[in-house]
Image: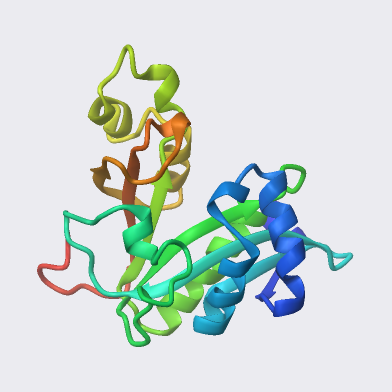
């Protein structure tokens, strides 16, 4: 399998420049700075993961922090993540993880899935309730003359019409809600989607948001 071509480890301060260059390659540099990466590693080092190939090159990055259950009125990405720095958002004993970045090099298929799989294992091993992810809706700007945001996000037969949302659905996430003014992002018309992947080993009544 493609994911077996990679291994993951905690990011270190010496990785910061490589992570930033990776994010630039993926077109994400507007939402991430080297200063953010420093604070993330200082605040929650076990939630900052890099994917490396057999030669030791960094080809993927995933950034998480811990939070409590989010209600249906979750705010913008900036509010949820302390503008990406996480220091004001991270809860040391939070019962959920929140994913900010899941980036793979365009020429390295499978590294994103490997990073996510290892983050999921960590969540389950630590008896957390699930992983939230704040996703872009990058296909909506091209579809907005034909579809409303809800039609585009929720799609038909339970699957979103947006490729990025559908990607998360395929690995087990469900849509919690659509958030206007989530992130300055022309491709998404500034919308975002809060998604949740629940720990299958925890069945607590009333936890569904």
**Residue at point 53% right, 57% down?**
101
Lateral position of residue 40 relative to residue 150, left or right: right
Using the rendered view, name the quadrant where residue 180 is placed. Answer: top left
Give how far across and how far down residue 84 sits, in percent. Answer: 47, 63
Give how far across and how far down residue 198 sits, in percent. Answer: 32, 64
Tally of marks: 0
**Residue at point 68% right, 58% down?**
60
**Residue at point 66% right, 52% down?**
23
Lateral position of residue 155 relative to residue 209, left or right: right
Lateral position of residue 199 relative to residue 58, left or right: left
Color scheme of the displayed model: rainbow
**Residue at point 38% right, 53% down?**
134
Using the rendered view, name the quadrant where residue 37 is placed. Answer: bottom right
Q: Nearer the viewer, residue 28 or 69?
A: 28
Give how far across and how far down residue 26 sits, in percent. Answer: 66, 44
Using the rendered view, name the quadrant where residue 61 is placed. Answer: bottom right
Lateral position of residue 178 relative to residue 23, left or right: left
Q: Most extreme residue toward the right, as rendered? A: 55
Q: Nearer the viewer, residue 94 or 203?
A: 94
Give how far across and how far down residue 44 sits, in percent. Answer: 50, 81
């Amino acid at each position: 399998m493609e994911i077996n071509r990679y291994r993951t480890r905690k990011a270190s301060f010496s990785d910061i420049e490589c992570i930033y260059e990776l994010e630039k390659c993926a077109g994400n540099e507007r939402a991430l700075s080297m200063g953010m990466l420093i604070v993330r590693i200082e605040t929650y080092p076990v939630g900052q993961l890099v994917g490396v190939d057999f030669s030791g090159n960094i080809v993927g990055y995933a950034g998480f922090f811990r939070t409590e259950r989010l209600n249906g009125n979750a705010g913008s990405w900036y509010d949820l993540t302390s503008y990406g720095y996480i220091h004001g958002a991270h809860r040391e004993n939070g019962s959920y993880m929140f994913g900010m970045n899941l980036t793979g090099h365009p020429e390295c298929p499978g590294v994103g899935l490997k990073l996510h799989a290892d983050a999921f294992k960590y969540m389950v091993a630590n008896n957390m309730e699930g992983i939230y992810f704040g996703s872009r809706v990058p296909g909506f700007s091209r579809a907005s003359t034909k579809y409303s945001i809800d039609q585009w996000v929720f799609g038909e037969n339970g699957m979103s019409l947006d490729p990025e949302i559908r990607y998360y659905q395929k690995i087990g996430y469900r849509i919690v809600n659509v958030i206007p003014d989530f992130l300055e992002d022309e491709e998404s018309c500034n919308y975002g989607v809060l998604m949740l992947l629940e720990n299958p080993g925890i069945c607590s009544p009333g936890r569904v948001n």
